[in-house]
Amino acid sequence: MRRAALLVGLLALAAIPRLLHLDQPGLTYDEFYDIEDSRRFCELGRPLQPISDGFLNGQAPFFLACLLEPLATQPESVPRALSVLAGLLSVALTYGLARRLLPSSWALLAAAMLAFSPWFVAASRLAFSHGHVFAVPWLLLSLRATLSARHRLARPTLALLVGATAGFAVGNDLLAAPWTLTVLLLALRRLSRTQWARWTACFVGAWLLGLTLASPMYVVQPLRAIQDVLARIAWWDGQTGHLWLGVEQQHLPLYYYPLVLVVRLSPPVVLLLVVAAFVRRSLALRVAWPCLWPVLLLTFKGWKSPFYLTPFLPLIFIMSAAALHRLARAGAAWRPRTVARLGTATVIAAQLALLLDSHPDHLMTGIRYGERTYGDFAGPAVSHGQWVRAALEHVRRDARRDDSVVLVPLGYAPRQIDHYASRLGLLEVHSADRLRHGVHPRQVEYVVVSHDVLAHADGLRFNQALLRLLTTPGLFEPLATVRSAGFPMARVWRRTPPRS
């Protein structure tokens, strides 16, 4: 009863940083288009034709978002709340998995480290697939079921449970695919060879069922699904894949993910991981280390992001708790309880300090290493919605009700401009292309130009009408520059007021 009360208290505390200011930062590219897919799912009932590239990300969150959308006060609240729920479930299931590998107090420590990790909090606050958190509960369930007692594991019902949860995880996030092999090999290792055939058949059948429930397109449109998978791993012909083993697309070094771990994890956790590399005879580490091999595949993939490591964070914190447990036992000659309490307090305090320092903009800036900045963009990996909203707030404070806004966009930004402009009460918003179709440049009152265009000297030349507009002497003047981590993310111009 005491353990259950502690876990419930931990979950209540973990919900606070996840729900606080849930609308901040603004919608990212992946979030925005996943929300558009969800609306299409609700309105048209056509989940097999997404407008974004998230074809293989699963429709289960879309279905839940449709059911809960009438309760939403803001467009991003329901999708992000679903991610919060998945994050809290992951915390609880991390305790369940760690309890099988460690004493209960140390299992609670592993869950607490995950609950207050700024990294995992960020993943738990991003809508749909962007934070890669929806697959985590199912991965933890499949791994926990695999660690059941051998006489229970041999039962077909356990094979069905492990296979269905692993398949559902892959259906929600293709990044979970290597876990399928890991879980299967771990289970077969614990079974006798005479049980392999029947257990594998049950596992594969349940895996396909779970995959189908999470992503029906694998069955309804198998050819398109295969093409999409191959497009993500198209490394054999020199093409850039988006997932496993893609060629280098961002020109990021092979040590990018070790660098991410060092920068994004708290120093005590990094030290405990170093200790874990030398610890022997620990069940938790013997289970966790083999499950981390997919990180090697991520190292060589064509596109890198810190969020791709999200599914591995529960294992990382279980390993950290196991290492601290071994250190406490090694200090038996001195006071093991004192070592345990001091180590626990240090780790949790460091996690909370990082969390308070970065909330609510976790992981929204690039990773600096020397003179270079690594992130999703050349500048900081800032949320697109954040700079769009900030730029339009400058316009809203300065504008009249009948003013128009023109955006020189990234390819997807005009729809985000529409989204935030309507919430801010701006009645007319036009994309740059509309200058060629019915909107005369002299009618434009404000211009918002994104950092992608600012970063290239020829960025404005694709739209000669807008270029002439901004270069006409005395016609426009700078209003504001939106910055993040010192980088200019957008600039706002307004029409020069007439002289009285």
Image (cartoon, rainbow, N blue to C red):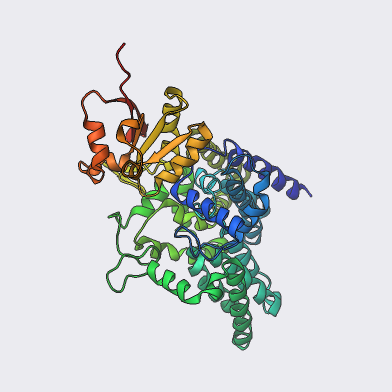
- Relative to residue 121, is residue 92 depicted above or below? below
- Displayed quadrant of residue 103: bottom right
Nearer to us in this view, 30 or 374: 30
Nearer to us in this view, 311 or 436: 436
**Is there any visible trace of residue 102 in the rendered image?**
no
Quadrant, the C terminus: top left
The percent coordinates of residue 352 (x first, y second) are: 54, 37
- Relative to residue 68, is residue 391 depicted above or below? above
**Is there any visible trace of residue 426 in the rendered image?**
yes
Residue occupying the far top of the picture:
500
Side of 22 relative to 469 (left or right): right
Residue occupying the far front of the picture:
438
Q: Residue at x 63, y 76 (%)?
A: 206
The percent coordinates of residue 475 (x first, y second) are: 26, 25
Side of 251 relative to 193 (left or right): left
- Displayed quadrant of residue 147: bottom right
The percent coordinates of residue 122 (x first, y second) are: 51, 45
The percent coordinates of residue 295 (x first, y second) are: 42, 62
Side of 496 relative to 323 (left or right): left
Nearer to us in this view, 217 or 150: 217
Q: Residue at x 43, y 25 (%)?
A: 399
Nearer to us in this view, 452 or 445: 445
What count of labels does the image hold?
Answer: 0
- Relative to residue 496, is residue 428 depicted above or below? below
Residue occupying the far right of the picture:
1
